[in-house]
Image (cartoon, helix red, strand yellow):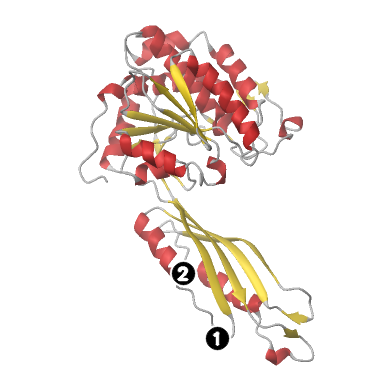
Amino acid sequence: MTTAEIAAWLEPRPAEMLALLRQWVEMETPSLEPERVGALARAVAEAFAALGYAPRFHEHALELARAGASDATLVLGHLDTVYPAGTLATMPFRIEGDRAHGPGVYDMKGGVVQALFGLRALAALAPEAALPSPLLFVYDEETGSRGSRALTEARARAARRALVLEPAAGEEGKLKIARKGIALYRLEAHGQAAHAGVDFESGASAIVEMAERVAEIASWSDAERGVTANCGVMAGGTRVNVVAAHAQAELELRAWSASDLQGLDRRMHGLRPRNPRVRLEASGGINRPPMEATEASLALAAEAQRVAAEVGLALGTSRTGGGSDGNFTAACGCPTLDGLGLVGAGAHAPHEHILISSLVTRTAVLAGMLAGSAGAAPRAKGLR
């Protein structure tokens, strides 16, 4: 079975794919409303049931497994979106030319539709072939995957490779072979309150200390190494005539390599105040380890490029500063290829969309990768 044969099977089905995508996009799934995400999970489970996939509903994820299926490949995605309920009122699903718009259409409900139709193609063209298992769709990716992470890591340790259904990089449709790791922190400064006019010298300003430390942290950014240190939220004080006794900041640090991110973590927890009368308290740590390119993951990308070439598609590769659950699978030593989802743009933004013209070819590439699941190579030596 060739990728071209898969594409030919898919060719008459974009309207059917779009109809299902619309149905799932119109089931709004904010990460912080688990009952809404759960409703979509039940609909997804029902759609995959026709292919013999039995659902297992975890607290933070839907797992789909098929008896007798190959377990060499973990297919990974998420069902939640960043958009609050009611977004459809101002951002409805709509088709304009080659673009289908809507909340979560690109990131990443389109990828779930791809997986379904790709597996349908394999089942129709090679009914005796083993289909991959498991498929894991988590409910909390957009808020850091704190609840689903352990399950994702457990399944990654049992798999020989992970294919991530996150959208492709940009309208060039590039695969994602590396992602930055992310560390999140809350920094608090505890000073001494005093009347700013009558007793200024007896005060110890938490705001001044915090401002100096945030400036210090910002200086850790290194464009050449791809290290970024960002303070996204800062607050403190009570009134303009009071020396501030408390200030706080929320910070995010990112880096391409595990060693750089671990070094930033040590520096963060090693911060010391300039003013000895102010106490600093740092909480938090590494949220997502980097997804670093390895020999095994680059071989996966090369395989995808060969599969894509069968339908005349030239797939490039890229690195991205954003994180996904592929960060977790890669850090577990499971060769991971990300960005196998649809082509489009505008993730998390009002102009979020997919390119309808990418439906057939991108789904065929994914299916071609899944068709080779049974023969997935063992992990490369040295991977943990």
> Could you say where residue 16 lies in the image, as x and y percent from the top left?
57, 12
Q: Does 218 appear above or below 156?
A: below
Give the residue displayed 65% in from the left and 71% down from the top. Answer: 247
Is residue 278 or residue 181 the one in the foreground?
A: 278
Q: Position of residue 241 (x, y in %)?
A: 79, 81
Secondary structure state at the residue bearing disc 1: loop
Q: Residue at x 55, y 36 (%)?
A: 139
Q: Amino acid at mark 2?
A: His
Q: Residue at the spot x=39%, y=42% of the render? A: 153
**Badge 1 local density, few (<14 within 10 Å), some, or many (20+)?**
few
Q: Is residue 352 visible?
A: no
Q: Specify the farthest residue to the left.
A: 381
| Residue at the disc numbered 2 | 269
Quadrant location of the N terminus in the rendered image: top left
**Residue 187: x %, y % from top left:** 57, 67
Residue identified by numbered label 1: 276
Q: CA distance from mark 2 to mark 1?
A: 17 Å
Q: Is residue 191 above or below residue 261?
A: below
Tell me the tag on residue 238.
none
In this rendering, the answer to whether 165 lies above or below 157 is above
Along the horizontal axis of the image, is 145 left or right of 298? right
